[in-house]
Amino acid sequence: MRWLYLITKTAKIKQIDMNCTELCEQLVKQKDCAHVCLKDSLPYILQLSAKKIEAIERGFGSFNVNDMMLYILMCKASFILTGQEYWIISTVDDLRECIKREREFAGISSRQLAKNVKVPITVIDAFENRDGGLRIESFLDIINALDIEIQFE
């Protein structure tokens, strides 16, 4: 079972078996609790199109982990992954390193992980090697397969 912890100034929310829509709901709650000056979030907003923001906030559409990271940074939120180790994620490269190391800690090859999450091995290899992005659904499948907890603060 997977747990998502969202810690805001007002509540701690736990949810089992998070899917894309549920993750997006938690991201919007994080945004709604954020106390950020427009000048601080503007650089991130300008990198996200209105379509990407709408896709994240509605929980469907085309967006990837890069877009999710921009949205999180826009809200001045922290993003923590916990598997065999505790990872503070502030960039997509941090996320790449976490997934690669957690996969290695679990003793799973990139080929086996790709098979487990039903994506081509080229997707896993390209993401880990900084040559490609990752759809949000694939990201959730990977963290579930690697037994990684996600936490936003």
Image (tube, rainbow, N blue to C red):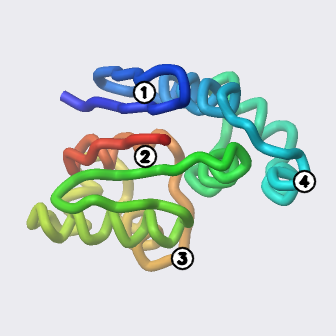
Foreground pick, 2 / 82? 82
Residue contact between numbered discs 3 and 1, judged by CB atoms under 8 Å: no
| Amino acid type indicated by mark 2 | Ser
- Residue 131: which numbered mark, if any? 3
Residue contact between numbered discs 3 and 2, judged by CB atoms under 8 Å: no
The spot of residue 48 in percent (x, y) is 80, 50
Residue reaching furthest to the front: 9
Question: Which residue lies at the image location 43% right of the left edge and 46% below the top edge?
Answer: 138
Question: Which residue lies at the image location 21% right of the left edge and 62% below the top edge?
Answer: 85
Locate residue 151: give its quadrant. Answer: top left
User: Which structural element holds mark 1?
Assistant: loop
| Amino acid type indicated by mark 1 | Asn
C-alpha distance separating marks 3 and 4: 31 Å
- Residue corresponding to mark 4: 39
| Amino acid type indicated by mark 3 | Asp
Q: Upstream in the sequence, badge 3 or badge 2?
A: 3
Foreground pick, 57 / 62? 57
User: Which structural element holds mark 3?
Assistant: loop
Q: Upstream in the sequence, badge 4 or badge 2?
A: 4
Q: Is residue 36 above or below residue 28?
A: below
- Residue corresponding to mark 1: 19
- Residue corresponding to mark 2: 138
